[in-house]
Amino acid sequence: MSQNPIDFRSDTVTKPTPQMRRAMAEAEVGDDVFEEDPTVRRLEEMAAAMIGTEAALFVPTGTMGNQIALHVHSRAGQEVICEMRSHVMNYEMGAMAVLSGLLPRPILTDDGLLTADQVDAAVMPDVSYRPRTGLVTLENTHNMGGGKVMTISRIREIQEVARRHSLPIHLDGARIFNAAAYLQVSPREAAAGFDSVMFCVSKGLGAPVGSLLCAGAAFAKEARKVRKMFGGGMRQVGVLAAAGLVALGEMVDRISEDHVSARNLAAGLREIQGIEVPALPETNILIFRVLPEWFGPAFVEKGTAIPFLARLRERGILAVPVDRDRVRMVTHFDLPADAVEKAVRAVSQGGG
């Protein structure tokens, strides 16, 4: 493998910019558990203003932000409506059950995007022998849906269903800025109508660590207590919040460039025999299928993704498997200018 591989595994592999490193080195700090870190306060205020909520809470990870929201909104024994391939269902280590005693009520969709009718049908009747529905969660963009974006109109329809059933609704908006860029709306509009919203500064925005949980003031006060209970109370964490301030101030407007790169990558790959690209990506995540014919007639293994990734790794390209036959590649600002060209060339060499 090349000493400097081109890394398409995730937009989480981005490294802090020089501006972020300077801000981190110069950050004014205090004890955040005592609510005395001025840099954290500025980041939380900036995040709340951008999302349109009364308050925000800085947390180490998106998973913690989601799980705090689930804990505050619900109570043990209740169900959480989510999409079958959602992050809260598959990539948070069963935390809703372990930490909060909650049961997921997953709904399988074709593209990762729930509909109002599906959510309505999943709400449990209020009877003595069924668990109650406690919360509805949406994910926008949808990671395992290939970065698919839920439209504002569909969001509003689902929010109306949640209101009709007196249910809170949480948005896993880890990549909400990608969604807003695709929809050509402000992050505030993409987040409107939710009772809580989590977004990450450590993905497409390039900060090294951190997410923000945005909600009303009373919710944020309770969320701060739950963060401490979950082990997320931090001390002089302004050194990390400083990078988040740069991310929100300088990196949001460029995020659509990653979408262009992903579409160019998809367009190149779909011309290669043995690669099945179902559609051009909407944002910065591309999921495609590797067919056995990419390897040639001698291929006999049960799945294609792992041997495909092994070949790419030898050629200096990194990506990740989604399942036995599908692969995910994510574009981001740390990729070199010729990354897409080199990735397409590597795949075009075939696997024989």
Image (tube, rainbow, N blue to C red):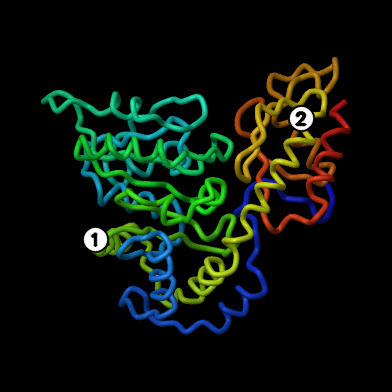
**Label 2 neighbour load within 10 Å: few <14, some 14-19, many 20+:** some
Q: Is residue 226 above or below residue 109?
A: below
User: In which quadrant of the rendered view does residue 77 lie?
Assistant: top left
Q: Position of residue 298 (x, y in %)?
A: 85, 16
Farthest residue to the left: give it.
128
User: Residue flagged by tag 2: what amino acid is it?
Assistant: Arg
**Label 1 neighbour load within 10 Å: few <14, some 14-19, many 20+:** some
Q: Is residue 85 left or right of residue 216?
A: right
Q: Is residue 40 above or below residue 335?
A: below
The residue at the point 46 percent across, 76 percent down is 238
* Nearer-N-terminus badge (1/2): 1
Q: Is residue 107 left or right of residue 205?
A: left
The answer to which of 296 and 20 lies nearer the viewer is 20
Q: Position of residue 82 (x, y in %)?
A: 38, 35
User: In which quadrant of the rendered view does residue 137 lie?
Assistant: top left
Q: Is residue 335 left or right of residue 58?
A: right
* Image mark for residue 222: 1
The kind of secondary structure element at disc 2 is loop
Q: Is residue 16 above or below residue 274?
A: below
The residue at the point 62 percent across, 42 percent down is 285
The kind of secondary structure element at disc 1 is helix
Q: Position of residue 93 (x, y in %)?
A: 43, 42
Q: Residue beneath label 2, please?
A: 270
* Image mark for residue 200: none
State the separation of the CA atoms marked 1 and 2.
49 Å
Image quarter in which the C terminus is found: top right
User: Residue flagged by tag 1: what amino acid is it?
Assistant: Glu
Q: Is residue 101 above or below residue 128?
A: below
The residue at the point 36 percent across, 59 percent down is 214
